[in-house]
Image (cartoon, grey):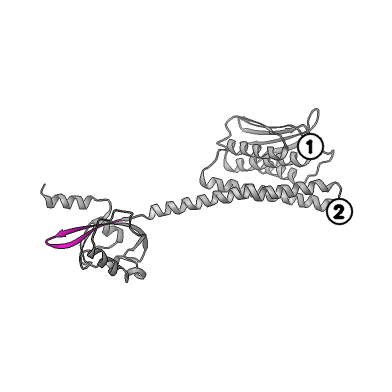
Amino acid sequence: MDEARFAHALIESCPDGLMLVDEDGTIVMANPVLGEMFDRSDLVGSCVDDLVPPELRHLHPEHRSRYVAHPSVRPMGTGPRLFAEDAHGRMFPVEVSLSPVTIDGRQHTIATVRDVTDRQESATEMAMLQDRERIARDLHDMVIQRLFAAGMSLQAVQAQAQPAAVADRIAGVIDELDDTIRELRAAIFRLGQQTERRSLSAQLTELVHDRARHLGFEPELHLVGDIDDLPDFIADQLVATVSEGLSNIVRHANASAAVVDLRRKGTALMLRIVDDGQGIPSAPKRSGGLSNMMWRAAELGGTCSVGANTPSGTVLEWRVPV
């Protein structure tokens, strides 16, 4: 193969856009990739300045003249951040490498152009995901903890509140705080799922460990069966139910131990949350947390019940089909 044919084959097979530009800025040669990149078939004979966005085009002749006066090899990615414009006016980020070459006694420049749109989008997405992670961390470590502390403070004064209407109003505020905390936790889980989808078992382990800080002890967690492939609509309701059940222990039980037992057997998913606390009233309220857990089970075609534990405490049983 002679040198001309070899050079032609090399230019044609290059995955990046290639062009040869003379001292006056005229494009002498352009490979097919460059034509596809700019969606133009008339690049040869046109001015390289025309490939620069209009708002920057008036600056390009000066930059080009300065390079011609002091030519040097500029590798890909070492120059300033650049943008190009295709035939339809679409701007896109590019990296350009420059190499001076002398042909027939005249100076030319070989320019290699690479569309880095995908890379920039990946960097933007990474920055967005990192921002989501920061927001989720701030919500968890600051906002939720403050709301939880406020709820605990209200819980401490509820029994002494007089008259009864005041106590009822405090109870309503506590329930609203519980709902807000639950919604924030759901938002945090959704934020986390945008980055790396955590397994259900990992979510439950983290949730139980988090509640240990408020309980004063670490609840036991038993996971039996394959739960990590549960559909999202079941997993989300399950996580919310475990969160609500443990929150109730924190607020009402005065317990020293608790067990979260989750079993998947056949077409049934069974959750039991047991504590050794002071138990439940003879006529528990059917509003707030208990109502939410029952509603979630019913929505999934299941059941939820709360009863006394032996010798003391409470048993929550939540069962849904899978």
Q: Are marks 2 and 1 in contact (CB under 8 Å)?
A: no
Q: What secondary structure is found at the residue carrying circle 2?
A: helix
Q: In terms of depth relative to the viewer, which is nearer, 73 or 197? A: 73
Instruction: Give the x, y percent position of residue 63.
Output: 29, 66
Q: Looking at numbered disc 2 in the image, what kind of residue is underneath it? A: Ala
| Bounds of the magenta segment | 99-113
Q: Which residue is mark 1?
A: 254
Residue 286, which numbered label? none
Rounded to the nearest angstrom, the CA distance separating label 2 from label 1 is 25 Å
Q: Quadrant of residue 292?
A: top right
Q: What secondary structure is found at the residue carrying circle 1?
A: loop
Q: Residue furthest right?
A: 163
Label 2 vs label 1, nearer the camera? 1
Instruction: Give the x, y percent position of residue 61.
Output: 28, 69
Q: Quadrant of residue 65?
A: bottom left
Q: Main secondary structure of the magenta part?
A: strand
The residue lying at 48 percent from left, 52 percent from top is: 127
Instruction: Give the x, y percent position of residue 255.
Output: 77, 34
Looking at the image, residue 108 lies above or below residue 190: below
Mark 2: few/some/many CA within 10 Å (<14, 14-19, 20+): few
Q: Is-magenta flag for residue 131?
A: no
Q: Residue furthest left?
A: 2
The residue lying at 71 percent from left, 47 percent from top is: 148
Q: Which residue is mark 2?
A: 165
Looking at the image, residue 107 lies above or below residue 308: below
Q: Earlier in the sequence, mark 2 or mark 1?
A: 2
Q: In terms of depth relative to the viewer, which is nearer, 116 or 89? A: 116
